[in-house]
Image: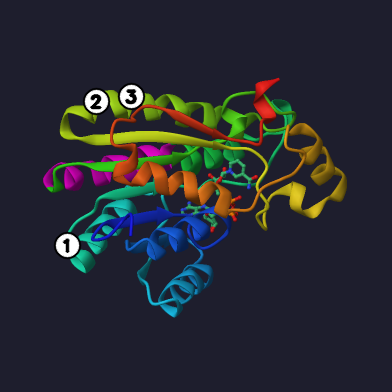
Amino acid sequence: MRLKDKVAIVTGAASGIGQAIAQVFAREGAKVIVADINDEGGRETVDLITGEGGTAVFGHTDVSVFEETKSMIAYAVDSFGGIHVLVNNAAYLKDFKPVTDTTEEEWDASLDVTLKGVFLCSKAVIPEMIKAGGGSIINIASVGGLVGFASYAAYCSAKGGVIQLTKSLAIDYGRHNIRVNAICPGPIDTPTTPEAQDEKLHQWQRDMTVLGRTASPEEVAYPALFLASDESSFITGSNLVVDGGWTIR
Ligand SMILES: NC(=O)c1ccc[n+]([C@@H]2O[C@H](COP(=O)([O-])OP(=O)(O)OC[C@H]3O[C@@H](n4cnc5c(N)ncnc54)[C@H](O)[C@@H]3O)[C@@H](O)[C@H]2O)c1
Protein backbone atom coordinates (compact mmCIF):
# COMPACT_ATOMS: atom_id res chain seq x y z
CA MET A 1 0.00 0.00 0.00
CA ARG A 2 1.83 3.08 -1.23
CA LEU A 3 -0.50 5.66 0.38
CA LYS A 4 -1.34 3.88 3.62
CA ASP A 5 -2.57 6.31 6.31
CA LYS A 6 -2.49 9.24 3.85
CA VAL A 7 -5.40 11.58 3.27
CA ALA A 8 -5.82 12.83 -0.30
CA ILE A 9 -8.13 15.41 -1.87
CA VAL A 10 -8.81 15.02 -5.59
CA THR A 11 -10.66 17.90 -7.27
CA GLY A 12 -12.76 17.18 -10.34
CA ALA A 13 -12.98 13.55 -9.19
CA ALA A 14 -16.57 12.99 -10.36
CA SER A 15 -15.38 11.97 -13.81
CA GLY A 16 -12.51 10.99 -16.07
CA ILE A 17 -8.92 11.37 -14.89
CA GLY A 18 -9.90 12.63 -11.42
CA GLN A 19 -12.17 9.66 -10.83
CA ALA A 20 -9.37 7.27 -11.86
CA ILE A 21 -6.88 9.03 -9.57
CA ALA A 22 -9.32 8.83 -6.64
CA GLN A 23 -9.84 5.10 -7.25
CA VAL A 24 -6.14 4.27 -7.63
CA PHE A 25 -5.23 6.29 -4.53
CA ALA A 26 -7.93 4.52 -2.49
CA ARG A 27 -6.71 1.11 -3.66
CA GLU A 28 -3.28 2.11 -2.35
CA GLY A 29 -4.69 2.84 1.10
CA ALA A 30 -5.48 6.58 0.95
CA LYS A 31 -8.59 8.08 2.49
CA VAL A 32 -9.97 10.18 -0.35
CA ILE A 33 -12.01 13.36 -0.44
CA VAL A 34 -13.80 13.55 -3.78
CA ALA A 35 -14.31 17.27 -4.51
CA ASP A 36 -16.44 18.38 -7.46
CA ILE A 37 -19.38 20.52 -8.55
CA ASN A 38 -21.04 17.40 -9.99
CA ASP A 39 -22.79 15.84 -6.99
CA GLU A 40 -24.12 12.79 -8.83
CA GLY A 41 -20.75 11.91 -10.36
CA GLY A 42 -18.96 12.64 -7.08
CA ARG A 43 -21.22 10.22 -5.21
CA GLU A 44 -20.69 7.64 -7.95
CA THR A 45 -16.91 7.88 -7.41
CA VAL A 46 -17.40 7.41 -3.66
CA ASP A 47 -19.61 4.36 -4.31
CA LEU A 48 -17.00 2.88 -6.66
CA ILE A 49 -14.32 3.29 -3.99
CA THR A 50 -16.35 2.05 -1.03
CA GLY A 51 -17.64 -0.82 -3.18
CA GLU A 52 -14.03 -2.02 -3.42
CA GLY A 53 -13.55 -1.67 0.35
CA GLY A 54 -11.83 1.73 0.19
CA THR A 55 -12.54 4.92 2.13
CA ALA A 56 -13.91 8.07 0.49
CA VAL A 57 -16.29 10.96 1.10
CA PHE A 58 -17.77 13.49 -1.30
CA GLY A 59 -17.62 17.24 -0.73
CA HIS A 60 -19.41 19.58 -3.14
CA THR A 61 -16.72 22.12 -4.04
CA ASP A 62 -16.39 24.78 -6.70
CA VAL A 63 -12.61 25.24 -6.88
CA SER A 64 -13.00 28.80 -8.19
CA VAL A 65 -14.62 29.98 -4.93
CA PHE A 66 -12.17 30.45 -2.03
CA GLU A 67 -14.80 29.93 0.70
CA GLU A 68 -15.69 26.56 -0.86
CA THR A 69 -12.06 25.46 -1.06
CA LYS A 70 -11.61 26.37 2.62
CA SER A 71 -14.73 24.33 3.50
CA MET A 72 -13.30 21.41 1.48
CA ILE A 73 -10.11 21.50 3.56
CA ALA A 74 -12.04 21.79 6.84
CA TYR A 75 -14.22 18.83 5.81
CA ALA A 76 -11.14 16.74 5.06
CA VAL A 77 -9.55 17.60 8.40
CA ASP A 78 -12.81 16.91 10.27
CA SER A 79 -13.32 13.61 8.44
CA PHE A 80 -9.79 12.21 8.54
CA GLY A 81 -7.64 14.40 10.84
CA GLY A 82 -5.32 16.05 8.31
CA ILE A 83 -4.28 16.25 4.66
CA HIS A 84 -1.19 14.88 2.97
CA VAL A 85 -1.98 15.00 -0.77
CA LEU A 86 -3.89 17.45 -2.98
CA VAL A 87 -4.51 16.74 -6.65
CA ASN A 88 -5.62 19.87 -8.49
CA ASN A 89 -7.39 18.19 -11.40
CA ALA A 90 -10.61 20.20 -11.98
CA ALA A 91 -10.63 22.35 -15.11
CA TYR A 92 -13.03 24.34 -17.29
CA LEU A 93 -13.46 22.13 -20.33
CA LYS A 94 -15.68 24.09 -22.69
CA ASP A 95 -15.78 27.21 -24.87
CA PHE A 96 -12.69 26.14 -26.83
CA LYS A 97 -12.27 29.07 -29.26
CA PRO A 98 -9.73 31.45 -30.81
CA VAL A 99 -9.23 34.77 -29.01
CA THR A 100 -11.50 36.91 -31.23
CA ASP A 101 -14.42 34.52 -30.67
CA THR A 102 -13.87 34.23 -26.91
CA THR A 103 -15.99 36.53 -24.75
CA GLU A 104 -14.52 38.16 -21.68
CA GLU A 105 -16.91 36.06 -19.57
CA GLU A 106 -15.69 32.81 -21.19
CA TRP A 107 -12.06 33.83 -20.66
CA ASP A 108 -12.71 34.65 -17.01
CA ALA A 109 -14.67 31.43 -16.43
CA SER A 110 -11.87 29.34 -17.92
CA LEU A 111 -9.06 31.05 -16.02
CA ASP A 112 -11.11 31.12 -12.79
CA VAL A 113 -11.47 27.33 -12.67
CA THR A 114 -8.38 26.05 -14.46
CA LEU A 115 -5.73 28.42 -13.06
CA LYS A 116 -7.23 30.33 -10.13
CA GLY A 117 -8.73 27.07 -8.82
CA VAL A 118 -5.20 25.66 -8.43
CA PHE A 119 -4.12 28.82 -6.62
CA LEU A 120 -7.14 28.79 -4.27
CA CYS A 121 -6.99 25.08 -3.39
CA SER A 122 -3.24 25.30 -2.80
CA LYS A 123 -3.65 28.44 -0.68
CA ALA A 124 -6.28 26.68 1.41
CA VAL A 125 -4.40 23.39 1.88
CA ILE A 126 -0.82 24.57 2.51
CA PRO A 127 -1.36 25.66 6.16
CA GLU A 128 -2.74 22.17 6.92
CA MET A 129 0.17 20.49 5.14
CA ILE A 130 2.61 22.61 7.13
CA LYS A 131 0.86 21.44 10.32
CA ALA A 132 1.14 17.82 9.10
CA GLY A 133 4.91 18.22 8.50
CA GLY A 134 4.69 18.23 4.71
CA GLY A 135 2.70 17.03 1.76
CA SER A 136 2.47 16.54 -1.98
CA ILE A 137 0.51 18.75 -4.38
CA ILE A 138 -0.02 17.46 -7.90
CA ASN A 139 -1.34 19.84 -10.53
CA ILE A 140 -2.91 18.29 -13.62
CA ALA A 141 -1.80 20.64 -16.40
CA SER A 142 -1.83 19.60 -20.08
CA VAL A 143 0.31 19.39 -23.18
CA GLY A 144 -1.78 22.48 -24.00
CA GLY A 145 0.38 24.27 -21.43
CA LEU A 146 3.52 23.33 -23.37
CA VAL A 147 2.52 23.86 -27.01
CA GLY A 148 -0.24 25.89 -28.61
CA PHE A 149 -3.47 24.40 -29.93
CA ALA A 150 -5.84 25.99 -32.46
CA SER A 151 -8.99 27.33 -30.74
CA TYR A 152 -7.77 26.61 -27.21
CA ALA A 153 -6.59 30.13 -26.30
CA ALA A 154 -7.97 30.41 -22.77
CA TYR A 155 -7.30 26.75 -21.92
CA CYS A 156 -3.67 26.83 -23.13
CA SER A 157 -3.07 30.11 -21.31
CA ALA A 158 -4.47 28.68 -18.08
CA LYS A 159 -2.48 25.43 -18.35
CA GLY A 160 0.76 27.30 -19.08
CA GLY A 161 0.02 29.24 -15.91
CA VAL A 162 -0.52 26.01 -13.96
CA ILE A 163 2.98 24.82 -14.96
CA GLN A 164 4.54 28.10 -13.78
CA LEU A 165 2.46 28.19 -10.59
CA THR A 166 3.73 24.67 -9.84
CA LYS A 167 7.32 25.93 -9.85
CA SER A 168 6.54 28.97 -7.68
CA LEU A 169 4.71 26.82 -5.12
CA ALA A 170 7.57 24.30 -5.08
CA ILE A 171 10.12 27.03 -4.39
CA ASP A 172 8.06 28.79 -1.72
CA TYR A 173 7.12 25.71 0.32
CA GLY A 174 9.99 23.26 -0.22
CA ARG A 175 11.43 24.08 3.21
CA HIS A 176 8.13 22.96 4.71
CA ASN A 177 8.61 19.57 3.07
CA ILE A 178 5.78 20.26 0.63
CA ARG A 179 6.53 18.94 -2.85
CA VAL A 180 4.63 20.39 -5.81
CA ASN A 181 4.68 18.79 -9.23
CA ALA A 182 2.69 18.99 -12.45
CA ILE A 183 1.55 16.32 -14.85
CA CYS A 184 0.95 17.19 -18.50
CA PRO A 185 -1.40 14.61 -19.99
CA GLY A 186 -1.69 14.23 -23.72
CA PRO A 187 -4.80 12.65 -25.28
CA ILE A 188 -6.71 10.74 -22.60
CA ASP A 189 -10.05 9.03 -23.26
CA THR A 190 -12.47 10.80 -20.94
CA PRO A 191 -16.16 11.50 -21.56
CA THR A 192 -16.18 15.28 -22.01
CA THR A 193 -13.36 16.20 -24.37
CA PRO A 194 -14.43 17.36 -27.87
CA GLU A 195 -12.19 14.61 -29.27
CA ALA A 196 -14.32 11.96 -27.54
CA GLN A 197 -17.34 13.12 -29.55
CA ASP A 198 -15.63 13.24 -32.95
CA GLU A 199 -13.87 10.25 -34.57
CA LYS A 200 -11.83 12.46 -36.94
CA LEU A 201 -10.43 14.45 -34.03
CA HIS A 202 -9.80 11.22 -32.12
CA GLN A 203 -7.83 9.78 -35.06
CA TRP A 204 -5.84 13.03 -35.25
CA GLN A 205 -4.95 12.59 -31.56
CA ARG A 206 -3.76 9.03 -32.19
CA ASP A 207 -1.64 10.22 -35.12
CA MET A 208 -0.03 12.96 -33.02
CA THR A 209 1.47 10.54 -30.50
CA VAL A 210 4.59 8.46 -31.02
CA LEU A 211 2.80 5.45 -29.53
CA GLY A 212 -0.03 5.80 -32.06
CA ARG A 213 -2.85 5.70 -29.53
CA THR A 214 -4.71 7.63 -26.88
CA ALA A 215 -4.55 6.61 -23.21
CA SER A 216 -6.89 5.52 -20.44
CA PRO A 217 -7.41 7.73 -17.35
CA GLU A 218 -5.51 5.11 -15.29
CA GLU A 219 -2.40 5.90 -17.34
CA VAL A 220 -2.44 9.35 -15.71
CA ALA A 221 -3.52 8.03 -12.31
CA TYR A 222 -0.39 5.88 -11.86
CA PRO A 223 2.05 8.76 -12.54
CA ALA A 224 -0.03 10.78 -10.04
CA LEU A 225 0.31 7.92 -7.53
CA PHE A 226 4.10 8.02 -7.96
CA LEU A 227 4.16 11.78 -7.31
CA ALA A 228 1.86 11.40 -4.29
CA SER A 229 3.93 8.62 -2.72
CA ASP A 230 7.28 8.68 -0.95
CA GLU A 231 8.82 7.02 -4.02
CA SER A 232 9.14 10.55 -5.46
CA SER A 233 10.48 12.08 -2.22
CA PHE A 234 13.23 14.16 -3.93
CA ILE A 235 11.11 15.33 -6.86
CA THR A 236 9.61 18.80 -6.71
CA GLY A 237 8.83 21.56 -9.21
CA SER A 238 8.89 19.03 -12.02
CA ASN A 239 6.53 18.52 -14.90
CA LEU A 240 5.86 14.90 -15.81
CA VAL A 241 4.74 14.72 -19.43
CA VAL A 242 2.34 11.81 -19.98
CA ASP A 243 1.56 12.26 -23.65
CA GLY A 244 2.63 9.13 -25.56
CA GLY A 245 5.42 11.22 -27.09
CA TRP A 246 3.15 13.92 -28.59
CA THR A 247 5.41 16.86 -27.69
CA ILE A 248 8.85 15.36 -28.42
CA ARG A 249 8.74 16.34 -32.10
N1 LIG B 1 -8.79 14.19 -21.24
C1 LIG B 1 -7.69 14.67 -21.80
O1 LIG B 1 -7.33 14.34 -22.94
C2 LIG B 1 -6.84 15.65 -21.04
C3 LIG B 1 -5.61 16.06 -21.60
C4 LIG B 1 -4.80 16.94 -20.94
C5 LIG B 1 -5.19 17.42 -19.70
N2 LIG B 1 -6.38 17.03 -19.17
C6 LIG B 1 -6.73 17.59 -17.86
O2 LIG B 1 -7.12 16.55 -16.99
C7 LIG B 1 -8.05 17.07 -16.03
C8 LIG B 1 -9.29 16.20 -16.00
O3 LIG B 1 -9.92 16.21 -17.28
P1 LIG B 1 -10.90 15.07 -17.77
O4 LIG B 1 -10.60 14.84 -19.20
O5 LIG B 1 -10.88 13.94 -16.82
O6 LIG B 1 -12.30 15.84 -17.74
P2 LIG B 1 -13.71 15.47 -17.09
O7 LIG B 1 -14.69 16.43 -17.67
O8 LIG B 1 -13.98 14.01 -17.23
O9 LIG B 1 -13.50 15.82 -15.55
C9 LIG B 1 -13.39 17.15 -15.11
C10 LIG B 1 -14.10 17.26 -13.77
O10 LIG B 1 -13.90 18.58 -13.26
C11 LIG B 1 -15.12 18.98 -12.65
N3 LIG B 1 -15.17 20.43 -12.54
C12 LIG B 1 -15.38 21.34 -13.53
N4 LIG B 1 -15.41 22.57 -13.01
C13 LIG B 1 -15.22 22.45 -11.67
C14 LIG B 1 -15.17 23.37 -10.60
N5 LIG B 1 -15.35 24.70 -10.80
N6 LIG B 1 -14.94 22.90 -9.36
C15 LIG B 1 -14.79 21.57 -9.14
N7 LIG B 1 -14.86 20.65 -10.11
C16 LIG B 1 -15.07 21.08 -11.36
C17 LIG B 1 -16.20 18.42 -13.57
O11 LIG B 1 -17.46 18.37 -12.94
C18 LIG B 1 -15.63 17.04 -13.89
O12 LIG B 1 -16.04 16.08 -12.94
C19 LIG B 1 -8.31 18.51 -16.44
O13 LIG B 1 -7.46 19.36 -15.70
C20 LIG B 1 -7.92 18.53 -17.90
O14 LIG B 1 -7.56 19.81 -18.35
C21 LIG B 1 -7.22 16.17 -19.80
Does 5 appear above or below 236?
below
Report the disc number at residue 25.
Answer: none
| Image-quadrant location for residue 151 | top right
* Apparent side of residue 131 relative to residue 83 in the rendered image (left or right): left
User: What is the CA distance from the residue labelled 1 to the residue labelled 2?
Assistant: 25 Å
Which quadrant does the N terminus fall into? bottom left
Identified by mark 2, the residue type is Asp
Using the rendered view, name the quadrant where residue 212 is placed.
top right
User: How far is disc 1 from disc 3 in space, using C-alphas?
Assistant: 28 Å
Q: Residues within 10 Å of mark 1 (few under 14, many from 20)?
A: few
The residue pinned by badge 1 equals 81
Residue drawn at x 39%, y 28% as measured from the top left: 165
Q: Which residue is mark 3?
A: 168
Q: Secondary structure at mark 2?
A: helix
Q: Secondary structure at mark 3?
A: helix
| Residue underneath mark 2 | 172
